[in-house]
Image (tube, rainbow, N blue to C red):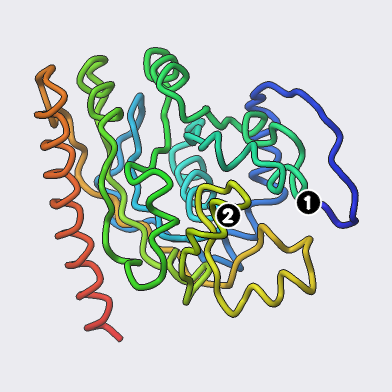
Amino acid sequence: MRLGCRSPRKEVGEFNPNYQQAFRKEILAPIVKYYFQGELQQINNLPQTGPMIVAMNHAGMCFPWDFLTLGYLLSETREWVVQPLASVSLFEHPWIIWWLPSQWSQVLGGVRAEIGDFEAAIAQGKILLYAPEGIRGPGKGWHKRHQLQKFDISFMQLSDRYHIPILPVLCIGSEFLHPWTINSKKLQRIIKLPFLPISPLMLILLLFPSMGIWAMKTRLKYFIQPLEQQIYSGKDRADTYQQAQKFRDKLQTQLNQELKSINKFF
């Protein structure tokens, strides 16, 4: 993290599982356990091994702590090496690499969210953490925080092509990582960010710029859904799109049910 007003050194790094493990143990562990209080629910649905695509809803509207937390919990529970798909437009933006070292996501196992890199990782049988909503997830703002946005189709196409199952995971609590936001599309275009969430909490960022990747304290709960062995078996893009949106509708129904259960409890 950038604790002073200086530019990061340009360094090139490759994924190192040992470094990922050390980072998880020494840095992520206390953050996940005591700050975000991450929990896996319905662990009976969690497979023993991969490969697979772990598909999760995304509503943090900030740095993807919901993804990092899930990756940590899966690794701790099953000793998996989990690699998230990282948006190129976000993680290589000059503002992001001011806070974090250049190519930090690749060093920690991030796979570039481009079809070639995505397919290569799938072909190698890796366990990938993926957000079907893409940038639309964190960019949807507070008023749509529980509404799943349009799903991309690439993960379904690759799942079908390489016979890789999809593990749906629903995260509840990520909406409070950066609450009460609106996405300023006008400013977003000016500074060339994929999304720009604006909220009263941005005043803290103006006073303490180095906290740009931080988030509010919340409780992240992950509800693991049954494994989807085969969602689609066809080649027509239009049909794949329809199947992806049906899959989204199914997860939306499950998310609504989980939210209703939590609200009843409290």
- Image coordinates of residue 103 in percent, x first then y, are 69, 31
Residue at figure coordinates x 74%, y 45% from the top left: 100
Q: Is 23 rendered above or below residue 148?
A: above
Q: In terms of depth relative to the viewer, which is nearer, 121 or 185?
A: 185
What residue is disc 2 on? 63
Q: Is 128 rendered above or below residue 179?
A: above
Residue at figure coordinates x 25%, y 32% from the top left: 153
- Image coordinates of residue 25 in percent, x first then y, are 67, 46
Residue at figure coordinates x 47%, y 70% from the top left: 219
Q: Amino acid at mark 2?
A: Phe
Sequence-wise, the earlier of marks 2 and 1 is: 1
- Image coordinates of residue 46 in percent, x first then y, are 30, 42
Q: Residues within 10 Å of mark 2 (few under 14, many from 20)?
A: some
- Image coordinates of residue 119 in percent, x first then y, are 38, 17
Q: In terms of depth relative to the viewer, which is nearer, 134 or 228?
A: 134
Describe residue 38's horizontal placement relative to residue 58 as left or right. right
Q: In terms of depth relative to the viewer, which is nearer, 54 or 12?
A: 12
Q: Residues within 10 Å of mark 1 (few under 14, many from 20)?
A: some
Residue at figure coordinates x 90%, y 48% from the top left: 6
- Circle 1 — which element? loop
- Circle 2 — which element? loop
Q: CA distance from mark 2 to mark 1?
A: 13 Å
Q: Amino acid at mark 1?
A: Met
Q: Which mark is residue 1?
A: 1
Describe residue 170's horizontal placement relative to residue 99 as left or right. left
